[in-house]
Amino acid sequence: MVVGRLCTFSLLLLLLGSDGASAGSRHRRQGPWGGVPPGHRDHGGGGGGGRWRVPPGLARRQGSGAGGAGAPGGQFNADVSASGPAPGPGPGSPSLGSRQGCVPSLTVVNGGQSTCSGELLFEDNFNDLEQWSNDVHMAGAPDYEFVVYKRSPRNIYIDNGIMTIFAFLTEDKEGPGFVSNGTMFVRGCTSSEADLCERTAFSYNILPPVRSARIHTANSFTFRYGVVEMRVRGPRGDWLYPQLTLKPAQSKYGPHFSSGEIRLPSHFGNRFLREPQQGGGGGRGGGGWRGRKLMRAGVVLGVRGENDAHMLSAEARAPQDVADWSRVFHVVRLKWAPDGYEFWVDGESVGRGKIPVPAGGFASLTGNPAQHAWASGGEDAPFDQEFFLSIGLGVGGLNRFPDTVTNGQNAELPKPWKNTSPKAMLNFWKAKDQWYPTWQSPHLQVSYAKVWAL
């Protein structure tokens, strides 16, 4: 009987591999191509279909699951064969200098740990949310979104290897009149600001009219420089937008945008959203139709203060065969290096190529470069520190939508609120009859997230 149990246990260890890691958990291993070629599309197709797990060392994908042809928008199939290099060491492996064949990378992780070039540092195929923590609080600075972020299965859930964040009206749960007259107590609040945890509505200071969710890796994985890739499907509905961002782990140069933010390619949920040709958002694509027809990415800098969303951006309009970016899943990618930032959607470059670090560093964009906090760091400060991944679904707010945009099929509707108005959230809520009927799919879906070393 004992021998039988030992044999069974040995067989289990053999099947799982020495570290027992799953395909959906974090690995540090050599990429199957020995590096990460810029613009390379969909390495592994999203995986995570079902609850099965792949033992380390076996072929990582066979084109099935959430990223295969049967997935929503599943035009991406695995192109990684089992004949590539064997996976590299996992967590707890020998130090960098003793790794056979390791080419040192500029990328560091989790407080300065060294990495090997092309190494897969983080992978989540969303079989669970073990690597992620939730933001649980009412939204505040710097974007002041019109939402409360919750840890609720109605707002965030996993099904067949796809993570979905769903936005719905607060009064759908709390009842009519709650937003204008109620008191919101956020159970399990993760903010240190009392007003983001408990608040009573009065006058024009209403409660957040929408419930959503946002998750992050601040407690499990941080890194400086690397290649980030996600397979996502964006929302359909006015004033909704994905939050696919990198945020600073330590806020070395001050709070919020003072320490920078990097945004992966994403689109607004509006079907009809127009910005005047002379109007700005800081993008390279000029004015014209935006909304679901336009992917935008870039770096955000608090040039004039911690809440100033000065964005150096790159844009990609939907090609004729992809008239609406939200219809299917797309692979978005960022290459973050000391000299600049490059973005791709489905292997195609976003914008005019790299957003370079300016001569003299980002401090040169401020009014007093020599005295600015960024001058104390590297030339690419504030992006010379470790960041973490953050994924959420935002609604409205005071930074994402310029006041110059118009909405509606004939651009006949002004934005319902002004970003500088103390009644911004109230005016958004009053216009519910305009925007809520457009919420066809008020959710963000992600089938995988990966990070490689440079």
Image (spheres, rainbow, N blue to C red):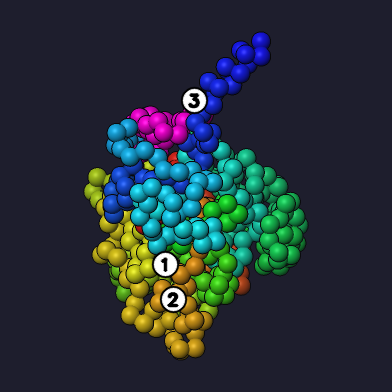
Q: Is residue 67 magenta?
A: yes
The residue indicated by pointer 1 is: 299
Q: CA distance from mark 1 to mark 2?
A: 16 Å
Compared to residue 283, the image places residue 171 above or below, namely above
Asked if residue 222 lies left or right of residue 153, the reply is left
Nearer to us: label 1 or label 2:
2
Sequence-first disc among 1 and 3? 3
Rounded to the nearest angstrom, the CA distance separating label 2 from label 3 is 47 Å
Task: Give the residue at mark 3.
Answer: 15
Which kind of residue does numbered mark 3 sit on? Leu
- Amino acid under disc 1: Val
Q: Which residues are magenta?
A: 43-70
Which residue in the protein does label 2 denote? 378
Of callouts 1 and 2, the N-terminal one: 1
Q: Is residue 366 visible?
A: yes
Q: Earlier in the sequence, mark 2 or mark 3?
A: 3
Would residue 140 be counted in the magenta stretch?
Answer: no
Vertical placement of residue 367 versus 413, above or below: below
Give the Cα separation between the discs numbered 1 and 3.
Answer: 44 Å
Q: Main secondary structure of the magenta part?
A: loop
The circle on residue 156 is none
The 10 Å Cα crowd at callout 3, few under 14, some 14 to 19, many 20 or more, is few
* Circle nearer the viewer, 2 or 3: 3
Numbered disc in front, either 1 or 3: 3
Callout 2, which amino acid? Gly
Q: Secondary structure at mark 2?
A: loop
**Position of residue 442 measured from the top left corner of the image (x, y, whole percent):** 50, 46
